[in-house]
C-alpha cells in the first residue's frame, strides 16, 4: 500500500486519484498531526460495506459459509 503526505496529496490530487483507480490499490494519506486516512476506489468500498452487512448477521454468515463449502 502506498502512502503520501497531505502536502503531496494536495499537490498531485488528480494523479493520486487516477492512480488509485487504475491500480485498484488503496493509498494512505498521512495528515500533519500523524492521523491517517485511506483513499480507495468506490467500487471496493461498496463491496466491503456489502460484505460487512452480509456477515453482520450470524445466521446469514453461517448460510454464506455453508454455500461456499457446497460450491
Image: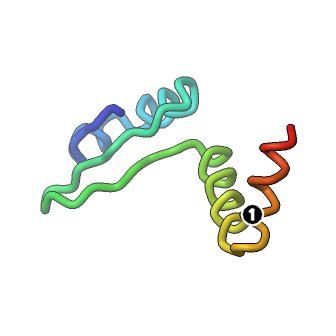
17 or 47, which is in the foreground? 47
64 or 70, which is in the foreground? 70
The part of the image, by quadrant, that contains residue 28 is top left
Quadrant where the C terminus is found in the figure: top right
Looking at the image, residue 55 sits to the left or right of residue 36; the answer is right
Colour logic: rainbow
Residue 48 screen position, x and y as percent = 62, 54
The residue shown at (45%, 47%) is 39
Query: Which class describes the residues within 10 Å of circle 1: few (<14), some (14-19), or many (20+)?
Result: few
Quadrant where the N terminus is found in the figure: top left
11 or 48, which is in the foreground? 48
Which residue does the numbered mark 1 point to in the structure image? 62
The residue shown at (21%, 43%) is 5
The residue shown at (31%, 41%) is 9
Residue 56 screen position, x and y as percent = 66, 72
Looking at the image, residue 13 sits to the left or right of residue 49; the answer is left
The part of the image, by quadrant, that contains residue 21 is top right
Looking at the image, residue 48 sits to the left or right of residue 30; the answer is right
Name the secondary structure under disc 1: helix
Amino acid at each position: 500500500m502506498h502512502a503520501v503526505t497531505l502536502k503531496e496529496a494536495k499537490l498531485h490530487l488528480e494523479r493520486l486519484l487516477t492512480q488509485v483507480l487504475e491500480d485498484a490499490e488503496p493509498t494512505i494519506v498521512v495528515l500533519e498531526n500523524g492521523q491517517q486516512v485511506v483513499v480507495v476506489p468506490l467500487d471496493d468500498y461498496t463491496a466491503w460495506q456489502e460484505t460487512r452487512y452480509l456477515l453482520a448477521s450470524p445466521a446469514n454468515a453461517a448460510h454464506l459459509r455453508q454455500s461456499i463449502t457446497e460450491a
